[in-house]
Image (spheres, grey):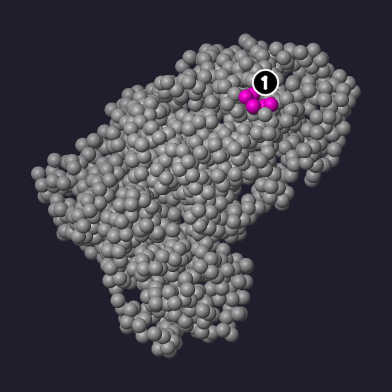
């Protein structure tokens, strides 16, 4: 059962510009007899469509970048959940993305949750307002044990000229996926009964816009608790960095030194 | 929960839901009320206007007029008043003062003083809010106080007020005529201005533009000056207008009261105004209005934009202003009377430099350095001065009583002597004029009584204000430093301003280059304007420059010094450092004795006095000189040093300027003694590792800088900030071209090439007057600098210019605001001339090895290689040297005794890349015609295409066997041949192929058929040639170069330790990091920055680098990406990211680190810090992955190393990195 926690609207205005919003998902027991949803084809279609947008004259680079990144994040989140064994392996199915095998959840609610999350993040990325997208894996006590941090920054001048570039980006993203799929070799095992949540670190004043936009109703973002952000003795493990014309992104994991309670 | 303010979500059920919440409803209601009240209020007041339509204000805090009054005003004049601030609706925030937190919060909003509203109403139109801003977002200074003198600003702005009153006093002499004239003219113009308004306007003008009045006044007396000021060559569409204007304007000057001619002028002005209204550029008008006088009603002012290039601002009918044209950018500064060259003239720069005399002096230092170097080279070991000293000593024992005890320690103690002429320019200037001795003298270009005619268009006061403010700021800083107040106000250049009345405007702006001690006592300082100095000290006499004499005296001084020792470091034309240790040891004299002799000799020969300071190091010697001045000498005995340095002010330390002095002052540090109390850690924390360390040492009188007799130039630069007035972008471009030529000349003269270009542009500060007070000067400016790294060291003006233009365009400046342009070339590499090749029999034995090394290093570190076609093997050998990275080279040269002469060759061979050579290379470095994608060729810019075609034409008969390159990078794999000696001339292949045995058969098989063919052909050809070659080559190829590295290390370390014993700090072994810095050009800097000729080779190099990667990258970075993607990665994105000594790629970095760790047994702190810096840059660049890999690699390398020093070095590096990561990410790196 996936339950969305009722999030309270918190208007506490902080002095610091950086606001952290998050959504919480907790899982008790995942049942796995669910028909697979063909997320892959959806994503792939979107990817293709973004490529065609590029060739058009009046393209909106922000949107294209957001499309590409959100798509990638979706794949990455699924894969992280699989690799870090947050959900039983049974709900995942093997698929092909970026020309490499990836694991995708087939649990409709989880998928919906991830898609909704990304839907909210997308406008932020479009405006280059999202600084970090974080997948936090928390233990039973809701203390984070691992954080997968996607640090995103877009170059001030977006210029995409050739089609070759997109395949180039695809290759870079593939490298991320591959790195994620082997990251369990570097990371310590997680304690049983973990949940995950998503955090978005926004740049200045973006929260204000987020409130306005509220892309999906009943899917509000709240300022994250200190407790969920802070981690005891974090250790940083860089995974991958990419630099391309459209986006600069790096992925690193922050891991709690003592994972087992 | 309903804490969402009035943006609260509508779904909340509190009764206001339907209206968007309580606050929203309230705001709505208030707005309604306001709208409702507005007509009433208008009726009540009997006036209404729509000045503020579209303006919505929000009043924050106390204002004058009060918020309520402002509300009424807004009602009456069509504005909006918001009781509650709304970021989206409120356009302006009105406030008189804001707390800091608010300022931060409202960052980016328009916060305006209430005067904006009142003034706008007075003016009857909406004034630009810019100059009413409460604080400005940019760091640009507010010129408000100057522009808006009538404003009752409290506090620090009493100075302008003071000025104002004074100005008023003088200006009042004029008002009678003025008033009449203004009124009449206005009437004539048919502008229905009321009498009162004119009064008002005049009142406004009085304080604001006293200079204008002054102008008018002066002009009326001095018609000639007016004519001069406005006589300018007109061009383009402006011509007719201007010509018609001229007679009118001159007539103003001649007869200020003849209204008739004035009418004519105004008629014309009116015409122009009409014209201007059509092309009224709002922004221009606004800013301009702000500058000149904010309270003028709009019709009186209009900017005419003709051709988009010329601005003429015609300013209302008031006579004071019709004579003043601030916008003749082109005309005013370059006005004919003095026949100054224009910046647009092609010869401007050479003219400038041939006339700029001060420029010459600055170049003398280089000349004298060369002079000393020459002396050293020609030295026959005979020093007449030294001999004289010897005789002196033999003749009469110098100070025998004190001498006997002191000579002992001197024998081992180094002694540095600092010789400095006493106020050089002055003493040279008056050496033939004994009557001037002992009088206050200043050397300056001004010959008169310190006054000059004022040029129109300047706003001297504004500038004075600025300088003063800047000074006050500094002074404020200084006074906070306890005990620094010894600089009294009267001693400062600008202090005279307070006591100076309006005359100030006409004072000479010639700067004082040097003044005598007597003048200094009167408070005059070097760099002061002569006019002010004259005020301070009426008896001040000026002496003109005498450059020949300076040179003569300086030369004499250096000759004198050189007669004692050749250990001379030229500091400037009148200042030198000598290492007299040897003399002391040889002759057993006391330092005082030598100093006496030197000073006496200088005085005798030059008739000028010099002061001498001596101590055990440069720092102390210089400080001693300060104590010795004037005409004295001072020797700091080792035992006195501690006491001496303790009392010195920190600001007397080199490198401690105002900022650092201020910082230290805050920390409670005034003297070096105070500074000694601080720990090294604290200093390093505060000022960075290097500066902190330097401070720590300096304040203890420690300084290990050697007297550098052959100091290498660090940069070559040329800068002009005088007389720069561009009107068109093309002029600026032409100017940059000329400046590049000048740089080229200088680079050639210095025999160096540089790899880093810095462009500095001075831009008129926002709000500064268009025309500075100093004729042709730059006025108040912002300096912008941009730097670019060139791919290769160059001295080619075309390359420099192209880069400079790119930088210039990237600044996106308005060319008319440019006031100065400078270029600087850094990262210099000496040009090695061919004739310094070591004789063949020395070179030969090493040639093969050398070559192979070169190959190897080329392959591993992918230093972009210049493959050179040459007929003689010797030359090619030398050229190949350039491919070799330094550690190898040193290793090769050092083991052989007696090859010390070959060292310079090794060291400087980076300079061998001459453009001409690379051009010659071009013929070989293109793909074979069959490989060319014609669509690509077509898409190339015309000039490049042409060149490519030409190359093919010339190549077609040369060889059918071209280099392999596919236009599609996907298939491009470039392989290298490790040895190629002598085959260049008959073989078209330039890319080195690896041993055939090294070629991966799979890769080979995967290649397209064509490629395979070509490769086979290439190998076939190579075999033929290599058969003819020495067999030795092949034997050596397979050997690991690291084997060679081992042996020389011992030699090197020995050498070093020896050096250390002699305590000569000159580093003999250069660490690979530094050498790389010199030799490896940045590969990844933008490809398009290169000249067309180089485009292709460059591309190839990139490909090579990628291919290298394929072969060598075995580290954990291989992440499943194909090489192809990496090739594309390097191609698609060309980042100017962090680099370690010029290396970007991981493989290069690894190579570099490996070289470093394996070749050097004792890492230098400098290098470690460089690695730390690189890692920090990586963190900042958010490239943690690379950082991780680099650290892991270092860990492997360094912890394997036998020396525990390396482990320690690694720990140090890691600690530093962890600290940075902790700061950035709040966590530390996990090291497995």
Closer to the camera, A197 or B339? B339
**Residue positioned 60% across, 35% down in the render:** B608
Instruction: Compare residues B899 and A102 and report the one nearer the observer.
Output: B899
Between B117 and B312, the one lying in front of the other is B312
Question: Could you tell me residue B934's position as x and y percent?
Answer: 56, 75
The chain holding disc 1 is: B
Which residue is tagged 1? B539
> Where does residue B571 sit, x and y in percent of width and height?
51, 43
- The furthest residue to the front: B395
Q: Quadrant of residue B177?
A: top right
Residue B438 lies in magenta, yes or no? yes
Which quadrant does the C terminus of chain B fall into?
A: bottom left
What secondary structure prevails in the magenta region? loop
* Element on which disc 1 rests: loop
Can residue B1083 be seen in the rendering of this structure? no
Judged from this view, the residue extending furthest toward the left is: A261
Within the image, what quadrant is residue B333 found in?
top right
Q: Residue at x 26, y 37 (%)?
A: A224
Front residue of B501 and B135: B501
Name above or below for residue A186 compared with residue B782.
below
Residues shaded magenta: B435-439
Q: Is residue A105 left or right of residue B1072?
A: left
Q: Where is residue B1025 in the image (x, y as percent from the top left)?
A: 44, 87
């Amino acid at each position: 059962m996936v339950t969305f926690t009722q999030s309270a609207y918190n208007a506490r205005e902080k002095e610091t510009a950086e606001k952290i919003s998050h959504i919480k998902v907790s899982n008790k027991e995942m049942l796995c007899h669910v028909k697979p949803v063909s997320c892959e084809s959806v994503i792939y279609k979107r990817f293709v469509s973004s490529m065609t947008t590029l060739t058009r004259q009046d393209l909106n680079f922000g949107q294209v970048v957001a499309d590409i990144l959100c798509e990638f994040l979706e794949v990455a989140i699924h894969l992280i959940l699989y690799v870090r064994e947050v959900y039983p392996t049974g709900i995942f199915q093997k698929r092909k993305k970026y020309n490499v095998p990836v694991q995708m959840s087939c649990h409709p609610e989880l998928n919906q949750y991830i898609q909704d999350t990304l839907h909210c993040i997308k406008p932020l990325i479009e405006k280059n307002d999202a600084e970090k997208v974080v997948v936090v894996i928390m233990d039973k006590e809701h203390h984070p044990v691992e954080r997968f941090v996607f640090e995103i920054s877009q170059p001030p001048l977006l210029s995409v000229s050739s089609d070759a570039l997109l395949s180039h980006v695809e290759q870079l993203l593939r490298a991320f996926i591959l790195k994620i799929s082997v990251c369990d070799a570097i990371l310590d095992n997680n304690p049983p009964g973990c949940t995950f949540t998503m955090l978005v670190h926004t740049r200045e004043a973006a929260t204000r816009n987020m409130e306005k936009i509220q892309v999906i109703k009943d899917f509000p973002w709240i300022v994250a608790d200190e407790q969920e952000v802070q981690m005891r003795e974090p250790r940083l493990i860089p995974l991958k960095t990419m630099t391309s014309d459209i986006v600069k992104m790096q992925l690193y994991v922050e891991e709690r030194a003592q994972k087992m309670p | 929960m309903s804490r969402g303010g009035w943006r609260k979500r509508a779904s909340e059920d509190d009764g206001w839901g339907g209206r968007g919440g309580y606050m929203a409803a309230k705001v709505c209601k208030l707005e309604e009320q306001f709208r409702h009240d507005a007509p009433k209020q208008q009726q009540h007041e009997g006036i209404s206007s729509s000045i503020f339509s579209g303006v919505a204000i929000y009043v924050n805090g106390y204002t004058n007029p009060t918020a309520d009054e402002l509300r009424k005003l807004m009602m009456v004049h069509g504005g909006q008043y918001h009781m509650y601030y709304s970021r989206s609706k409120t356009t302006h925030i009105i406030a008189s003062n804001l707390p800091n937190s608010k300022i931060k919060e409202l960052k980016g909003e328009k916060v305006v003083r209430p005067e904006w509203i009142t003034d706008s109403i007075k003016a009857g139109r909406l004034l630009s809010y810019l100059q009413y801003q409460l604080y400005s977002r940019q760091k640009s200074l507010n010129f408000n106080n100057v522009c808006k003198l009538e404003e009752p600003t409290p506090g620090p702005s009493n100075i302008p007020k003071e000025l104002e009153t004074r100005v008023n006093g003088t200006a009042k002499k004029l008002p009678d005529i003025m008033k009449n004239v203004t009124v009449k003219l206005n009437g004539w113009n048919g502008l229905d201005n009321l009498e009162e308004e004119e009064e008002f306007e005049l009142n406004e003008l009085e304080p604001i533009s006293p200079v204008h009045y002054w102008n008018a006044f002066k002009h009326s007396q001095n018609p000639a000056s007016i004519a001069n000021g406005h006589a300018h060559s007109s061009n383009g569409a402006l011509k007719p207008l201007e010509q018609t204007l001229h007679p009118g304007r001159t007539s103003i000057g001649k007869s200020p009261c003849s209204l008739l001619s004035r009418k004519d002028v105004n008629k014309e002005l009116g015409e122009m105004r009409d014209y201007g209204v059509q092309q009224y550029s709002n922004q221009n008008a606004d800013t301009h209005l702000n500058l000149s006088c904010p309270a003028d009603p709009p019709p009186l002012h209009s900017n005419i934009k003709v051709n988009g290039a010329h601005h003429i601002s015609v300013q209302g009918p008031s006579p004071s202003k019709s004579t003043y044209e601030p916008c003749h950018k082109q005309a005013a500064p370059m006005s004919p009377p003095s026949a100054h060259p224009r910046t647009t003239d092609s010869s401007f720069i050479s003219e400038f430099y041939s006339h700029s005399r001060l420029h010459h002096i600055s170049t003398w230092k280089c000349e004298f350095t060369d002079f000393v170097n020459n002396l050293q080279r020609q030295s026959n070991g005979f020093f007449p001065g030294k001999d004289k000293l010897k005789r002196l000593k033999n003749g009469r024992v110098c100070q025998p009583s004190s001498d006997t005890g002191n000579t002992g320690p001197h024998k081992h103690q180094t002694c540095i002597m600092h010789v400095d002429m006493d106020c050089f320019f002055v003493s040279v200037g008056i050496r033939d004029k004994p009557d001037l001795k002992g009088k206050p003298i200043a050397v300056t270009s001004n010959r008169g009584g310190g006054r000059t005619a004022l040029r129109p268009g300047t706003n001297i006061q504004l500038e004075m204000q600025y300088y003063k403010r800047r000074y006050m700021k500094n002074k404020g800083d200084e006074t906070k430093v306890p005990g620094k107040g010894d600089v009294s106000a009267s001693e400062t250049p600008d202090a005279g301003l307070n006591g100076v009345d309006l005359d100030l405007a006409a004072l000479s702006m010639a700067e004082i280059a040097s003044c005598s001690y007597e003048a200094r006592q009167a408070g005059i300082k070097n760099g002061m304007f002569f006019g002010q100095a004259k005020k301070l000290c009426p008896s001040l006499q000026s002496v003109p420059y005498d450059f020949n004499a300076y040179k003569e005296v300086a030369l004499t001084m250096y000759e004198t010094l050189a007669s004692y020792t050749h250990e001379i470091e030229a500091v400037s034309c009148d200042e030198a450092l000598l290492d007299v240790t040897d003399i002391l040891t040889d002759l057993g004299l006391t330092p005082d004795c030598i100093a006496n002799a030197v000073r006496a000799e200088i005085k005798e020969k030059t008739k000028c006095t010099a002061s001498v300071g001596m101590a055990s190091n440069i720092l102390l010697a210089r400080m001693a000189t300060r104590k010795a001045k004037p005409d004295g000498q001072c020797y700091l005995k080792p035992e006195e040093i501690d006491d001496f340095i303790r009392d010195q002010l920190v600001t007397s330390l080199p490198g401690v300027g105002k900022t650092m002095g201020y910082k230290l002052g805050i920390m409670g540090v005034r003297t070096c003694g105070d500074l000694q109390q601080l720990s090294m850690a604290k200093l390093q924390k505060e000022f960075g590792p290097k500066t902190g360390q330097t401070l720590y040492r300096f304040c203890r009188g420690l300084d290990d800088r050697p007297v550098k007799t052959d100091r290498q130039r660090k940069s070559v630069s040329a800068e002009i900030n005088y007389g720069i007035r561009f009107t068109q972008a093309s002029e600026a471009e032409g100017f940059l071209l000329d400046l590049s030529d000048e740089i080229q000349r200088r680079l050639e003269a210095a025999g160096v090439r540089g790899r880093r270009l810095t462009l500095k542009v001075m831009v008129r500060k926002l709000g500064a007057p268009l025309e500075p007070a100093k004729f042709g000067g730059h006025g108040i400016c912002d300096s912008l600098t941009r730097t670019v790294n060139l791919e290769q060291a160059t001295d080619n003006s075309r390359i420099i210019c192209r880069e400079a233009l790119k930088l210039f365009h990237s600044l996106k400046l308005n060319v008319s605001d440019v006031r100065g342009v400078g270029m600087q070339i850094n990262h210099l590499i000496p040009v090695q001339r061919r004739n310094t090749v070591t004789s063949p029999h020395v070179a030969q034995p090493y040639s093969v090895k050398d070559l192979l090394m070169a190959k190897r290093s080329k392959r591993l570190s992918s230093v972009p290689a210049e493959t050179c076609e040459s007929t003689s093997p010797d030359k090619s050998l030398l050229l190949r040297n350039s491919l070799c990275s330094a550690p190898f080279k040193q290793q090769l040269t050092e083991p052989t005794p007696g090859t010390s002469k070959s060292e310079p060759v090794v060291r400087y061979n980076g300079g061998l890349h001459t453009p001409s050579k690379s051009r010659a290379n071009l013929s070989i470095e293109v793909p074979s015609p069959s490989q060319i994608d014609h669509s690509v060729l077509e898409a190339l810019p015309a000039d490049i295409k042409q060149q490519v075609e030409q190359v093919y034409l010339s190549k077609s008969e040369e060889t059918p066997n071209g280099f392999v390159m596919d236009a599609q990078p996907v298939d491009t794999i470039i392989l290298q041949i490790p040895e190629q000696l002598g085959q260049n001339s008959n073989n078209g292949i330039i890319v080195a192929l690896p041993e055939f045995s090294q070629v991966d058969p799979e890769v080979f098989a995967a290649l397209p058929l064509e490629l395979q063919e070509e490769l086979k052909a290439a190998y076939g050809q190579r075999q033929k040639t290599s058969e003819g070659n020495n067999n030795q080559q092949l034997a050596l190829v397979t050997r690991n170069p690291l084997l060679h590295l081992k042996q020389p290390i011992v030699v090197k370390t020995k050498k070093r330790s020896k050096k250390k014993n002699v305590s000569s700090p000159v580093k003999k072994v250069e660490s690979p990091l530094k050498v790389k810095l010199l030799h490896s050009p940045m590969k990844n800097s933008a490809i398009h920055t290169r000249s067309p000729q180089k485009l292709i080779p460059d591309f190839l190099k990139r490909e090579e680098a990628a291919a290298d990667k394929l072969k060598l990258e075995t580290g954990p970075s291989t992440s499943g990406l194909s090489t192809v993607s990496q090739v594309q990665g390097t191609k698609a994105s060309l980042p100017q990211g962090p680099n370690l000594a010029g290396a970007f790629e991981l493989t290069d970095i690894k190579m570099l680190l490996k070289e470093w760790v394996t070749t050097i047994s004792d890492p230098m702190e400098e290098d470690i810090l460089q690695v730390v810096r690189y890692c920090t840059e990586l963190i900042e660049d958010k490239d943690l992955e690379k950082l991780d890999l680099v650290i892991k690699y270092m860990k492997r390398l360094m912890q394997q190393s036998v020396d525990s020093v390396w482990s320690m070095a690694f720990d140090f590096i890691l600690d530093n990195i962890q600290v940075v990561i902790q700061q950035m990410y709040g966590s530390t790196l996990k090291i497995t």
